[in-house]
């Protein structure tokens, strides 16, 4: 049974608790306390009385109440709670609407969730966290405050817009913080926001961005709110996909297509965009890569070849990285072959920007980027092969002479795309179908169709014309 539990880091919990502006001795609820991170933070940093509810028997049993005088804990369903609170803080569970009825053994059903939100209008397609937030509003006194961390993929869907309007009817989002980095233990790949909500209040929202560094420092800055930001579901590609360069050898002349009869350590590798046609690596031409890793047993032929290659490197004094290893009597010829990626994209382009489906499961050289995610490959292809992304790439890339455009990894990281989970199911089906046709035919009318289908998610049109103008300007400098 999927309970949708992810656990908030303590540094984030402390930040969220610090957003409360409640009076002394206020009564605060965590309606899904899990491992108790908010309970500990509240007890350590405030004088509030704290209640906690947890439906999961295992989590409830494992958590020992740190202060029974100030903290009351209950194993039960938050949607059965009737008490009114000064404050509520939570990381609500993330369960898709299709799975809600799977929670019936715990006494939870979609019908119960709908009725628990009183007269609030909520879509039957709502995620469980939306029910938690709307129910929490009912459990707040007038002027009460709610602090919540939850996925921000809701912000540009019909369900999300309805959810937002219901919140606005009953109060104000005073603070909205987009979070970049790892807010949760075990780092699930999801974009999140932190929201402070005050019941019965009217006013403006203060927008910020929080970046979580690798050593868990929080860097928070105010951002200018764009008119449509609350209805924008665009996320950076790096938040939903893993992007990395292909295999670097340091000296292709020694490692690519080596003159060896022994094939024990030879793997196929895609070397150039010229080696495939269209939008797929299927039936592409591939080179051979000598890929030796630590612990491999080498044939006599391989040992001789490597000794001769080392002599050439020492004589020429380059590449310096390999020469340094040879000077230090270190193995200079080890190469790590990573898992293949769903999609590949050239490091340098000229006329045609295109992300390529890696149907052949090719290893690729470092003149390609490797892009993988937990989402469907064809859907990811559609999110990348459209004029919204192509226009961004023209703006992000750097001129490389002769009309070429060089794109660094940090450029690819910053591409903004609709979050896959905000895309309507019928749109997903169409996007996948269009991508299948694009891969089969390479006909660019499918790019137009994908772009048109994504237009509501980006919120503006005319992007193809903008892209063509940018591309023409780049190429015109070198004609």
Image (spheres, rainbow, N blue to C red):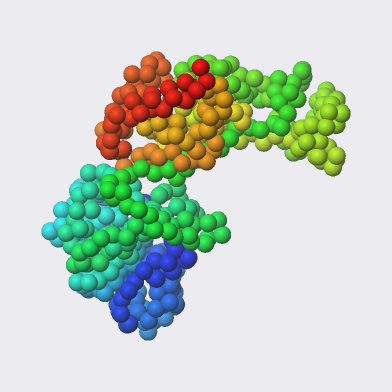
Q: Quadrant of residue 85?
A: bottom left
State the count of labels: 0
Image vertical order of residue 243 relative to residue 121, above or below? above
Residue placed furthest toward the left: 119
Residue placed furthest toward the bottom: 69
| Camera-side residue of 30 and 445 | 445
Q: Position of residue 151 (x, y in %)?
A: 36, 52
Q: Residue at x 28, y 59 (%)?
A: 205
Asked if one can make out residue 180 in the rendered structure from this viewpoint, the answer is: yes
Q: Residue at x 48, y 65 (%)?
A: 11
Q: Residue at x 50, y 33 (%)?
A: 397
Q: Position of residue 393 (x, y in %)?
A: 45, 32
Q: Quadrant of residue 447?
A: top left
| Camera-side residue of 408 and 361 | 408
Q: Position of residue 126 (x, y in %)?
A: 25, 49
Image vertical order of residue 467 relative to residue 425, above or below? above
Asked if one can make out residue 300 in the rendered structure from this viewpoint, the answer is: no
Report whether 57 appears left or right of 341. left
Q: Residue at x 35, y 39 (%)?
A: 418
Q: Position of residue 441 (x, y in %)?
A: 39, 15
């Amino acid at each position: 049974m999927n309970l949708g539990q992810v656990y908030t880091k303590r540094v984030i919990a402390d930040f969220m608790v610090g957003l409360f502006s409640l009076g002394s001795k206020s009564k605060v609820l965590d309606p899904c306390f899990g491992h108790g991170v908010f309970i500990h933070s509240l007890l350590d940093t405030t004088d509030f009385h704290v209640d906690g509810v947890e439906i999961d028997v295992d989590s409830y049993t494992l958590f020992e109440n740190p202060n029974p005088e100030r903290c009351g804990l209950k194993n039960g369903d938050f949607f059965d709670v009737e008490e009114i609170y000064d404050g509520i803080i939570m990381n609500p569970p993330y369960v898709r609407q299709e799975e809600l009825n799977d929670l019936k053994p715990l006494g939870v059903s979609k019908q119960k969730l709908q009725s628990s939100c009183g007269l609030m209008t909520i879509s039957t397609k709502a995620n469980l966290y939306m029910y938690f937030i709307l129910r929490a509003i009912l459990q707040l006194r007038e002027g009460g405050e709610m602090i919540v961390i939850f996925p921000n993929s809701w912000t540009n869907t019909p369900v999300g817009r309805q959810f937002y309007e219901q919140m606005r009817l009953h109060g104000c989002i005073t603070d909205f913080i987009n979070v970049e980095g790892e807010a949760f233990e075990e780092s699930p790949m999801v974009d999140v926001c932190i929201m402070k909500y005050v019941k019965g209040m009217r006013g403006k929202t203060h927008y910020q961005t929080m970046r979580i560094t690798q050593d868990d420092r929080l860097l928070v800055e105010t951002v200018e709110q764009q008119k449509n930001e609350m209805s924008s579901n665009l996320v950076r590609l790096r938040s939903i996909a893993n992007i990395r360069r292909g295999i670097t050898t340091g000296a292709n002349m020694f490692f690519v297509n080596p003159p060896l009869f022994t094939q024990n350590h030879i793997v196929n590798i895609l070397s150039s965009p010229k080696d495939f046609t269209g939008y797929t690596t299927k039936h592409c031409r591939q080179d051979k890569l000598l890929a030796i890793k630590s612990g491999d047993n080498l044939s006599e032929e391989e040992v001789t070849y490597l000794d001769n290659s080392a002599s050439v490197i020492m004589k020429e004094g380059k590449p310096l990285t390999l020469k340094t290893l040879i000077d230090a009597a270190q193995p200079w010829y080890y190469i790590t072959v990573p898992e293949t990626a769903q999609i590949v994209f050239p490091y340098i382009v000229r006329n045609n920007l295109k992300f390529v489906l890696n149907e052949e499961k090719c290893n690729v050289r470092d003149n390609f980027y490797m892009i993988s995610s937990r989402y469907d490959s064809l859907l990811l292809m559609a999110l990348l092969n459209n004029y919204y992304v192509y226009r961004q790439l023209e703006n992000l890339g750097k001129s490389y002479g002769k009309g070429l455009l060089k794109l660094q990894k940090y450029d690819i990281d910053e591409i903004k795309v609709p979050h896959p989970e905000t895309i309507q199911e019928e749109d997903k089906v169409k996007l996948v179908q269009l991508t299948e046709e694009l891969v089969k035919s390479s006909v660019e009318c499918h790019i137009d169709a994908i772009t048109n289908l994504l237009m509501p998610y980006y919120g503006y049109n005319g992007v193809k014309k903008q892209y063509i103008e940018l591309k023409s300007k780049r190429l015109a400098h070198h004609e």
